[in-house]
Image (spheres, rainbow, N blue to C red):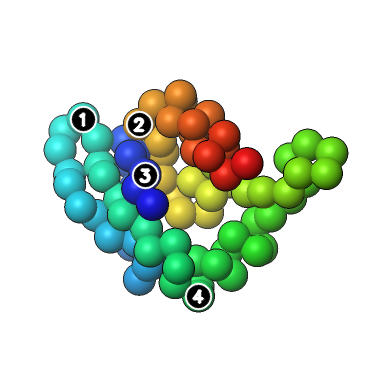
Amino acid sequence: MKLYAKTISATLPDWATVVTKSADFIEIEINDEHPNFQSLLEELETEIEPGIRGVKAEDLCSRLGIEMSNSHLCQLLEQAQK
């Protein structure tokens, strides 16, 4: 899974790698099969809508200490998780 951010924290977890860094955005690749990432998802999982459980993109970004490069990407990430 890839995320595109404007800013990132000084340190990223071992399952997240910066692929591209430019003035406009930072491309981050996430190993979504890594056990620590799966644990984080389980910890952040909430009921998004009645009967639908998932992780809100804003919660994931907050935990990673990143700011998404485009608010529409947050919406797309949330839709993809459903």
Residue 68 seen by the camera = yes
Q: CA distance from mark 1 to mark 3?
A: 14 Å
Q: Which residue is mark 3?
A: 3
Residue 73 place in picture, x, y as percent:
43, 31
Q: Earlier in the sequence, mark 1 or mark 2?
A: 1
Q: Amino acid at mark 4?
A: Pro
Q: Which residue is mark 4?
A: 35
Q: Nearer the viewer, residue 64 or 77?
A: 77
Relative to 29, residue 34 above or below: below
Kind of element beneath mark 4: helix
Q: CA distance from mark 4 to mark 1?
A: 31 Å
Q: Earlier in the sequence, mark 4 or mark 1?
A: 1
Q: Amino acid at mark 1?
A: Asp
Q: Earlier in the sequence, mark 2 or mark 3?
A: 3
Quarter of the image for residue 25 reads top left
Residue 75 place in picture, x, y as percent:
53, 29
Q: Earlier in the sequence, mark 4 or mark 2?
A: 4
Q: Amino acid at mark 2?
A: Ser
Q: Residues within 10 Å of mark 1 (few under 14, many from 20)?
A: few
Residue 9 seen by the camera = no
Residue 64 place in picture, x, y as percent:
46, 54
Q: Amino acid at mark 3?
A: Leu
